[in-house]
Amino acid sequence: KTCVDGQNRKRRAALSPEKKLGRGRQYNAKYKSQPGAFELYLITHARIRNAKHYPNTDFDLTVEWVQQQFAAQEGRCFWLKVPMRLRHNSGPWQVSLDRLQLDIGYAKDNVVLTSKSANMGRMATEVGDFELFLEDVRTSMRMI
């Protein structure tokens, strides 16, 4: 087995950088196109953040929960009500997990699905303040 591993290592080392990149892209494209892959990506990263920042909080999010929540929100951002995309590299329309109470971890009763841009815009703003801000934006947009 060591001989085979050594041979594979030599073959990989002999590949040009373009070939190596191409193989990586093929794998990523194949993986990312699988149903539930993006949801698993969201859950995995939330689990890591939860363990790091909220170690005493139970983590109960699942791929199924993300899919059910997406359906319950009719595929729309919790804050902006714009349609979202449940896939990688969707820009500002990409789904993101947003905690309502910032001092609590990622739990089903504390997380909503938002667009990536809304989540980045909110950052550490409390729910009430962000709702006031969004109302100001809506009022301003009606005046234009």
Image (tube, rainbow, N blue to C red):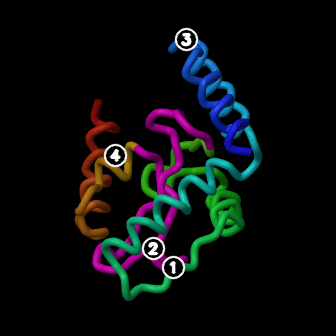
* Residue type marked 1: Phe
| Residue named by callout 2 | 106
| Residue named by callout 1 | 59
Label 3 environment density (alpha carbons within 10 Å; few <14, some 14–19, many ≥20)? few
At 50% across and 65% down in the image, what residue appears?
112
Sequence-wise first label, 4 or 2:
2
Quadrant including the N terminus: top right
Give me the C-alpha separation between circle 1 and circle 2: 6 Å
Residues under numbered marks 2 and 3 in contact, where contact means CB atoms less than 8 Å apart: no
> Is 140 situated left or right of 9 in this image?
left
Residue bounds of the magenta highlight: 87-116
> From this viewpoint, is residue 138 visible?
yes
Sequence-wise first label, 3 or 1:
3
| Residue named by callout 4 | 138
**Between tags 4 and 1, which lies in front?**
1
**Between tags 4 and 3, which lies in front?**
3
Q: Is residue 144 magenta?
A: no
Q: Position of residue 74 (x, y in %)?
A: 66, 55
Give the number of the disc on residue 51. none
| Residue named by callout 3 | 16
